Amino acid sequence: MSDYKYSIIIPHYNIPDLLMRCLNSIPVRETIQVIVVDDCSPEAHTYKEKYPELSRPFLEFYQTSQGGSAGRARNLGLEHARGEWVLFMDADDLFADNLCELLDEHVEEGPDIVFFNNRSVMSDDLTQPANRDFYQYLFKEYEETGSELNLRYDFYSLWGKVFSRAFIERHGIRCDETMYSNDVLFSFMAGHLAGKIRVVDEPLYIVTQRSGSLASSQFSGKAMSLKECEDRLDVSIRVAQMTRKYNIPVKKELHMEHSWAMRLHYPWHYLWRLLRLLPTAPRMFMLFLRRDFRTVLRMLKSWV
């Protein structure tokens, strides 16, 4: 039997003031386990002394043994989760004021995942709306068509969802232990494997927009680092492979979104990644040696 009804897992790196704001949006309740996992922040050893919020009841503070991966922090949080339901949260975001009411009303035994809507605000002024409402169209589409397909497969973030912990453990679903896009495959596999889901078109989660966040470069139009390009491209190719394996009729736009920067700024790295990851790589390599470039390009085109 679970010790808590809900476990909220928060990976954190070096934004303690925003983390405290995040924690203040979570009510202190004996039914809610809060798990903060610090990913080797430089001053983490001073946090408990500086921030009394970390000593609140029902909160547990852990640290990863090796930094550089929010996915590793989330997986460590899952090892300590004891709630019936699991929620993931980013340390610079917030929950809606009526979090408990929404959870108690809509989360009950039965579904494997409950999808909640979200809204976005500017981090430095929470009264100002931001433009990170990029999943709201999925709820509108669901309302209009009743189809769960795109909610299951195109809602790549972990926040805004409530997962049955029994479901996660039964299937052994975990995050990639990378810096970027570590939640994409988790979300994709959870959406694919879930039996019953529930969709609630009310904002449970508040996404903030700020410069310097891991997500900011993806939507800013600025050139990504090679590391970011590699992480995002690797996972998008794996998602594309799975859509083919399971014959899932979803768009393959994720690969386009995550590969344009590498193609533009790191073309040889891009080609090497494709050749190394694609199941047809051996055949493509032989065709390349034979200078059958037209066939190689046609095969690549089917993935990009």
Image (spheres, rainbow, N blue to C red):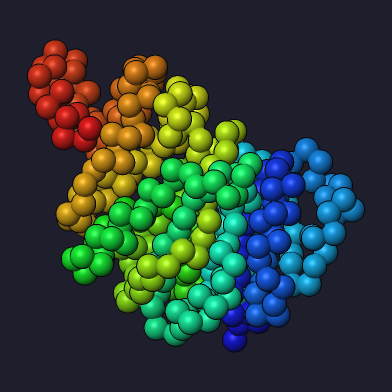
Tell me which residue sits at (41%, 62%) in the image. 117
Q: Nearer the viewer, residue 236 or 145?
A: 145
Q: Write down the quadrant of residue 77 in the picture.
A: bottom right
Q: Nearer the viewer, residue 27 or 3?
A: 27
Residue 106 seen by the camera: yes
Quarter placement of the N terminus: bottom right
State the image coordinates of residue 258 (x, y, percent, origin top left): 36, 34
- In this rendering, would 172 be left or right of 16? left
Quarter placement of the C terminus: top left
Q: Residue furthest front?
A: 127
- In this rendering, would 295 be left or right of 92? left
Q: Write down the quadrant of residue 6 in the picture.
A: bottom right
Tell me which residue sits at (85%, 59%) in the image. 52
Q: Nearer the viewer, residue 150 or 236?
A: 150
Residue 179 seen by the camera: no
Q: How many marks?
A: 0
Tell me which residue sits at (78%, 38%) in the image. 42
Tell me which residue sits at (38%, 63%) in the image. 190
- Above/below status of 68 relative to 49: above
- In this rendering, would 264 be left or right of 244? right
- In this rendering, would 295 be left or right of 115? left
- Above/below status of 74 relative to 303: below
State the image coordinates of residue 206 (x, y, percent, origin top left): 53, 56
State the image coordinates of residue 292 (x, y, percent, origin top left): 11, 17
